[in-house]
């Protein structure tokens, strides 16, 4: 609320933030029908400090999806698959490195040194020679850093858009209920608890 936001009942709020998935209020939202049906998502409160201004005054681009707070009962299994969450990485710096705040780490990714940018360009050029030989812009370098992120913090296994075959036919918009067609979502099982 101090940053210009307002406090509201969780059903009326545009965004929900929590730093503790085991807190009774957070658990109640995770167990709600709205959450189970995808109408509510809880984000870790570290996002609020990660998206702040840099020392220069420029806004950082921070991916909100990296800060989704899963239910407490699922976090250990997720850690086994992806490693530490982004908010935990800010708390525990790698061995031998000084402790940085999340904002400092994000600023470092956003700024990047010229050497890192050149190495990134060289690595990209080697791996994507057939795609393009142009030098990526600074915006593309900022975007590329999160692409390296999934190796230790997001569920991978999705096909790259570049790897998908190109559709050659005519594309038409689909509006459920129009032209005699309907779309249904059939849920096989609903569980209201993590047990």
Image (tube, rainbow, N blue to C red):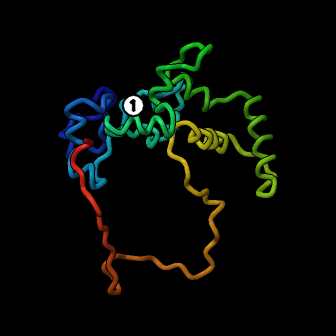
106 horizontally vs 87: left or right? right
Q: Is residue 187 above or below residue 116?
A: below
177 horizontally vs 51: left or right? left
Which residue occupies 81% across, 46% down? 126
Q: Is residue 66 visible?
A: yes
Q: Is residue 10 above or below residue 187?
A: above
In which quadrant will I find the N terminus? top left
24 horizontally vs 77: left or right? left
Query: Disc 1 marks which residue?
Result: 48
Foreground residue, 189 or 16? 189
Q: Residues within 10 Å of mark 1 (few under 14, many from 20)?
A: some
Foreground residue, 75 or 60? 75
Residue 37 rendering spot, x and y as whole percentages: 27, 55
Residue 108 rendering spot, x and y as whole percentages: 61, 26
Q: Quadrant of residue 88?
A: top left
Which residue occupies 49% across, 31% down? 84
Q: In the rendered picture of this protein, how many numbered marks are placed on residues?
A: 1
Circle 1 sits in a helix, a strand or a loop, which is it?
A: helix
Q: Quadrant of residue 10?
A: top left
Q: Is residue 4 above or below residue 156?
A: above
Residue 4 rendering spot, x and y as whole percentages: 31, 32
Residue 29 rendering spot, x and y as whole percentages: 23, 42
Which residue occupies 30% across, 26% down? 2
In which quadrant will I find the C terminus? top left
Q: Quadrant of residue 189?
A: bottom left
Q: Is residue 12 visible?
A: no
In the displayed orientation, state which residue is furthest to the left.
Answer: 9
């Amino acid at each position: 609320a101090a940053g210009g936001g307002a406090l509201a009942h969780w059903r009326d709020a545009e965004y929900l933030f929590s730093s503790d998935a085991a807190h009774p209020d957070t658990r109640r939202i995770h167990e709600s029908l709205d959450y189970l049906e995808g109408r509510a998502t809880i984000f870790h409160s570290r996002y609020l400090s990660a998206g702040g201004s840099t020392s220069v005054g420029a806004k950082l681009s921070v991916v909100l999806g990296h800060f989704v707070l899963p239910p407490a009962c699922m976090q250990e299994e997720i850690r086994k698959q992806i490693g530490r969450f982004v908010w935990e990485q800010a708390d525990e710096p790698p061995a031998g490195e000084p402790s940085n705040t999340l904002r400092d780490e994000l600023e470092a990714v956003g700024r990047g040194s010229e050497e890192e940018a050149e190495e990134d360009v060289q690595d990209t050029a080697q791996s994507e020679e057939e795609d393009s030989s142009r030098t990526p812009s600074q915006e593309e370098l900022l975007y590329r850093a999160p692409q390296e992120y999934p190796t230790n913090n997001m569920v991978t296994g999705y096909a790259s858009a570049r790897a998908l075959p190109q559709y050659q036919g005519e594309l038409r918009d689909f509006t459920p209920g129009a032209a005699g067609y309907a779309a249904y979502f059939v849920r096989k099982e609903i569980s209201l608890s993590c047990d």
